[in-house]
Structures are given as structure tokens and as C-alpha cells.
Amino acid sequence: MKAIRTFTVRPVLAESLTPLDRLASNWRWSWSRSTHALFASMDPALWDEIGANPARMLGAVGQPRLDELARDEAFVARVREEDDRLSAYLTGERWYQGLRGPKPAHIAYFSPEFGVDGSLPQYSGGLGILAGDHLKSASDLGVPLTGVGLFYRAGYFRQSIGDDGWQRESYPLLDPYGLGLTLLRDRDGSPVEIALALPGDRTLHARIWVADIGRVPLLLLDSETPSNSDDMRKVTDRLYGGGGEHRLLQELLLGVGGVRAVRAWSEITRRPAPDVYHTNEGHAGFQGLERMSELITHDGLTFDEALAQVRASTVFTTHTPVPAGIDRFSRDLIADVLAGGLFQGLDAGRAIALGLETWDGGDQGVFNMAVLGLHLGQHANGVSVLHGEVSRGMFGHLWPGVDTDEVPITSITNGVHAPTWVHPALKALSERVWGDAHTDTHDWTDREAVTDAELWGVRQQMKGELVAEARRRVAASVSNGSGVTPSWVGDLLSPDVLTIGFARRVPTYKRLTLMLRDPERLTRLLTDPERPVQIVIGGKSHPADDSGKILIQQLVRFSRDPKVRGRIVFLPDYDITLAKDLYPGCDVWLNNPLRPLEACGTSGMKAALNGALNLSILDGWWDEWFDGENGWAIPTADTAANDEERDDVEAAALYDLIEHQLVPKFYDREGGIPLAWLGMVRHTMTDLGTKATSDRMVRDYVQRLYVPAAAHDAALRADGFAEAKALAAFIGRVKDAWGRISIASVDSSGIPQQAQAGDTLEVRADVRLDGLSPEDVAVELVYGRTDEDDALDADHSVHRLAPAGPAHDGIVTFTGALPLSVTGTFGYAVRVVPRHEQLVSPVELGLVTYAS
């Protein structure tokens, strides 16, 4: 008989053990080795059985065992010590508190998924893991950030693989109380509930669960509340589980409900309202419309003034390099929502226009969430240098007339939370040698600090744990509950064999089965009698993506062939828990997407921090940080005639690298240790340890995006939004006049026929400013080296020309002198752009006039 509901019954804690409640409810335990070990020590076997979650542990361990522990003086002392550590962590000053100058008082960070721990399955892949790491590093650095997401009652799916190799999904229901979440309550003790007015006189209600991620609160909105009708209760049933209106309702709840949840949280905790709003992908784009509605109805701003204020304080991060990865809704569906009274005071037609694909080739019947995010976010970025370039090309049509390299989308390369992802054995070695200092300061190349034998020993230990876990998972999978495990499982994988890992979501562009392109050659590599290779694979396909499921099926069927069964294995249900064994246990991390479709690819970073070398297509973060000593780059077949040829060429290159470079270097030993291989490992851990961390990433966000956004927000908000009103008026005036702006003539002098460094280029430009003043524009000399087509390099420079006097016959003359320091082929152009101190980029309005 199946229960219709499950929940956790918590025991009564003795006074000496009451701090366990606080320790269990703060998710810092997920990256604190000592707190994690404390709960595990209560009953190690039970700890593994219940999924290594402290809140579940307290519900499962039983009153007699707790009473016994309360009498254990050593355990009670450990509890007290951990509680003191948590208090010091939560109250002490950290990096952010020492940051000089004006800075945000509160940052709201919106994401549709958060990957904090395997026991809280509110994530599907890299986007969620990145969001979880962002919160953890914000906590470690003391950044005043609040996370905003949804609580999915069934989370993401659990994966199993059938006898036919086909992926199957199941959705166990989650008990938020049993996970260590707390319900946000008003000061009178009643649960806080927000409500969204929907078309058809419907209302979507949601309660708010709070997860303490160290110093950072994570607010998760939950539609499972008695106030809702049955259909509304299902809005947050599962992550990415529906389409159409169901997905739209989730995103309305995340964006609009998220803003209202933050408002309630700030009021109850007396925390200042956020002055920066960061949307992690476009799913939360409606937060901007909600805030515009507030400014219009509560502060009396116009649509344009509210838009200027919201843009100033919004950071938008895009993670997708492909249009198919963007959520798009019917224009009519959005029109129905806007007509339903959800956004008070908002001009529906103008609000819809913020998300429409109005460019040539776009679909004006579609509302695009990334377009909405970019129109509402004055500060925008991709998640690697290459992805920034891809994004500028992908979204460049939003800034017509602007060169692609100047599209106002920057990049901040992702990072990973080292305390979460570095294996405990490697952490222990690090702490023994360097103490508790941050991992990004360690010099692993110092063989006197850490000997080759020590480092190799830890690497082998981590690999041995992966092998054991792989055998355990495969045994559970193939026994089908019978308890009988086939004998071959005991020979599955070996700690002594070169181990390659590959695990990620399974859309087709990530090419899970590229390794199967030449099955006979792969078989020879796997089964070489003296220098074999083994591959450990994991990954989930979206439940609606049959093409991805077919790839998994092909891989599983190959791995079950008795000829290779001991050397290649697919491990089902890839999640954070499995990843923590997989990344450290691999010698090499493989990534072979279609370039440039990998936005960042942080799994390779996690592996690298554990001493694995990367074998990857030059895509995402690898494109900017590969240096020839931290792994191998798979050549990209950009000139291939078609996809088939491209896959053939790149697969052949992959096999060649494994056979002729990886295998010899790994198996070349002195005293049983591959010294040259370890040299690459040491370099990787030292070099990427300074770059690939989410601490570095969050510091970048603070200094490059959050601080400027807060400054813009404060400037526009001051004196009753005086600057917001002035900026909106400026934008309106400039847009109205721009079609009449022209450069009548450009003259240059001072340069002989053969110029040389040190000469001075003098430029005079006559500009017709019909309806604008010289203060409204910047007339710029854009200069630098040129290519064979006379195009300026992307790293060109800009020199501003100055007005030489008043207008004559409607024309203003601008002049400037430029000493030449660039040698080689040189060129310049003259252009006019709007000028206002509250514009982040001179081309962000998409208004540029060039001299002919």
C-alpha cells in the first residue's frame, strides 16, 4: 500500500544536543567537512542510507541513540565546537566587509534551479549547480545576497536504465521539513503567502520555504498550499516538467512572486530592500516588469522612467549559446497575462514589445525571455570569454548598426565552489601542508611541500573510491532487487587503469556518443593488454528529449558488450552525490561538444581542482584557459563539409590523442609513479586553482557588475528619481532626433604620405545635430589596426573629439588631435553616439551614426 503523503517526525533533543537543529538547518554542512563528519558519526551506515542529509538523520536515528549521544561527553563537545564555528562563520567579517567604497546593501539573485546538495534535488544540470556555487561563494565572501527560486515538490527526476538501455524517470515526492527547510512566517507566526492575479479570475498563491546557505538565505516559492485550486497546486510540481502555460506560470511565479517574496523577507527580517537584481538566465525576466509596475503605481513614474530605473539595477546573465535553449511563449498568451491585472499600471503593449523578436528573421508572434532579460538588464554578461563573443553575435540584432564586438554584453567566466567539490582526502592533504588558507593560494608544483608519492597516493585513493562506487551502483542496477550480483561486476574497472570521465546533460550538441564513432578502435584502446583505458560515464536526458535518450541507449548497449564491459560503464542517476566521487576519481575529464555551443562547461573545472587533466574541444572555459600543460585540446574540424564529416574528423583526433599522448604519458613510470603526468597535474591544480573557483567568479560579479549596478540605481533613485526622469527624457529626445543626425564632412591633416610613430593626426568633423545639443552626443574617432578588408580590429581604441564652437547653419564642428603610436596598417572612422553619464555603453541604445 502506497502512502498518499510522507513526512519526517523529529525527535526531542536533549539540551546538550539542541545545537544540532541549527547545524542541520544551515546548508553550510554540505561544504564543511567537520560538520558533515559530525552527523555521519552518529550512525555511519544510516547516514549513507538516508542520503547524507542532517535533517533526515535527526528524524531517522531514533530517540534511544540520541539519548545515548547526549551522554557522550566527547560527542557533546564536538557539537558545541561545531556550533561555535558556525556562529563565527555567520557573524565574522569577510572579504566583502573589507571592500572599500560604495557597494550594494542587498542583491537578489534569481534562478529557476539551485544545486546545493544531492539531497535537495532542485536542479537539472550546470545552470543549477552554478547557481548553488554562486550562493556558497557569496556566503564565504560575506556578500549580502538572497537567492530566489522555486520549490519543486518532485524535484528533477531520478533516472534508471532498463534492460533495453532506455532511460526511465521517477519522481519521488519531497518533504521540505524533512530536508531542513523552514517556512517563512510573519511576525504573528502565520505563514507568509504571496498571490498572483491571473486571467480568468484565477489566483496563484505560493508559500515561501527558506534554506540557509551559510550566510545567504535561499527563498523557494511553493504552490502546494491550501489557498490554491488543484491545478494551481501543480505549478511547482517538478522542474522543467511541463511546457506552454505551465512553464509560463512557473516563470511568472519565479519573477513576479520572487520579487514579492523578497519584499516580504526584507520586511520581516528588517533587511534593506535589494538595490541590485541578478537574473540567472531569462526564466526570471518578469521580475523586471513587476518592479516597473511598483515604480509606476507606488512612486508615480512613467513607463520610460520606470524602465530606466529597473535597467540600471538589473544584471542579466545568459547561459545559452543556441536559440533553441531560450524559453519563448506565444505573444497572445503573454497578452492574456498582461490583460489579467497582474502588472498594475503597466502599458501592456509596450511591456510586450520588450520581449518581441522584432528583427528581420525574428518571429513577432513570439515573446522571447532572453530578449526581455536584455531589454530589462543594463548590465549583461555571458559565462566565458568565448560565450561572450557568441552572445554578442547571437543577440546583436537588438543593437542594429552596432558592430558585433561592441554589443554591450560582457563576460564573466564561471567558477566552481572548491570546498564543495574538492575531495576530502585532497582537502586533508592541502590543510596539512598549507593550513586553512584558501585553495587558490596553493603551489602544488612545490615537490618539497607535497611529494610525488603523497600526491599520487591521494589520487589513487580517490580513484579507488570511484571504482568501488561504480561497482556498487552497477551491482544494484543489474541485480534488479534479487540480491544476486553477476561475477563480472567484481572486475569492473581498476584503480590502476587510465580513467577517463564524461558526465553531463545529454542534449545532442554535447555528443555523448562521439567516442563510439569508431567502435573497433575504441574497443582496442579499452582492451589493450598492457596499457588499457577505461571510461566512466553519466548523464540525464530531458524526459521529453527522445533523441538524447537514444544516445544514452546506444552508449549503454555498447558498454554491456562482454568484450568491453569491464572497461566502460554508464552510471545511472548522475547528480551531485555521484559527481563528488566521479570528478576526483578520474585521471582525465572529457568534453567534446560542437564548438561553440558549450557556454562554459564547469564539470571540467571540478575535475581539474581534484587533479584531473582535461581533454576537450576548445569551447567554453577551456578555450581561454588551455595552455598546453593542463591537458589536451581536441582539434575542431571547422572546415568540414557537414556534421558527419566533422564528427568523423574530431573523433579520429580524440582517439589519436588518447593513444599517442595520454596513454604513453600516463603509463611512463619511475618507481611506479608517472612523474611527467604528475607534473601536468601539479601545474593544473596550481594554475586553475587561481582561476576556476566561484570565489573568483563572485568577486568579479561584485566588482564589475554589482557595484556599478548599485551605483546606477542610487544615482537614478536620488532626489525623488530626478536622474531617472532626466535619463528617460534624454533617451526619448535622442531617439526622436536620431534619424536626422548626420556627419556632413570629415577632414584630416598633419599626416604626410608616409606616416610614422609620433606624428599627430588632426581630425575635423562637421556634424548636423538637428534638435540635439553637443552635450547630448559624443563624436568619436575610432582607430586601430585594420585587416585586409580595411575593417578595424576588435581591440580598436576610441578618442573623443571636442566641439570647436557654436553651431553654424545647424552644424557643429568637432576637432581632435591624436598622436600616432600604433604601427603597421592603420585606419580610423568617425561616428556619433549618444552621451549620458548613466549609460553603461555608448552604443547601448543602438543609435550610432558613422561618417560615410
Image (cartoon, rainbow, N blue to C red):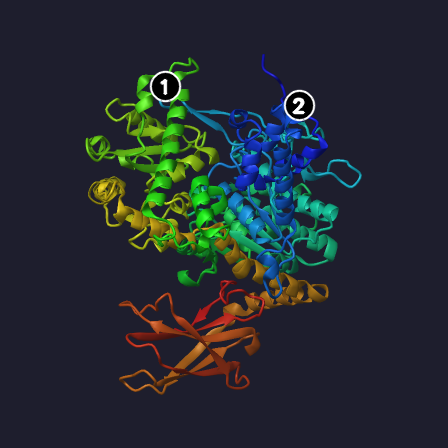
Which quadrant of the figure contains the N terminus? top right
Give the CA distance from mark 1 to mark 2: 42 Å
* 257 sits to left or right of 542: right
In the shown orientation, is residue 396 left or right of residue 735?
left
- The structure residue drawn at horizontal position 57% and vertical position 47%, both measured from the top left corner, is 285
Q: Quadrant of the C terminus?
A: bottom left
Q: Can residue 367 be seen here? A: no
Q: Percent from the top left, x then y, of residue 171?
A: 52, 25
- Which residue is drawn at the image coordinates 52% and 68% (left, top)? 738
Query: Is disc 1 placed on a helix, strand or loop?
Result: loop
Location of mark 2 (residue): 63
Residue visible at 42% across and 14% down? 483
Question: Closer to the camera, 107 or 378?
Answer: 107
Query: Which disc is residue 526 wearing?
Result: none
Q: Which amino acid type corresponds to the residue marked 1 in the rendered image?
A: Asp
604 relative to 567, above or below? below
Amino acid at circle 2: Gln
Residue 114 shown left or right of residue 591 in the figure: right
Q: In which quarter of the image is residue 77?
A: top right
Q: Is mark 2 on a helix, strand or loop?
A: helix
> Contact (CB < 8 A) between labels 1 and 2?
no
User: Residue 16's spot in the image, x, y percent?
Assistant: 69, 34
Give coordinates of residue 734: x percent, y percent: 56, 68
Residue farthest to the front? 73
Identified at 38% across, 70% down, the residue is 796
Find disc 1 in the rendering and name its residue: 163
Residue 376 lies in quadrant: bottom right
Q: Which of marks 1 and 2 is in front?
A: 2
Figure quadrant of residue 479: top left
The answer to whether residue 75 is visible is yes
Total residue callouts:
2
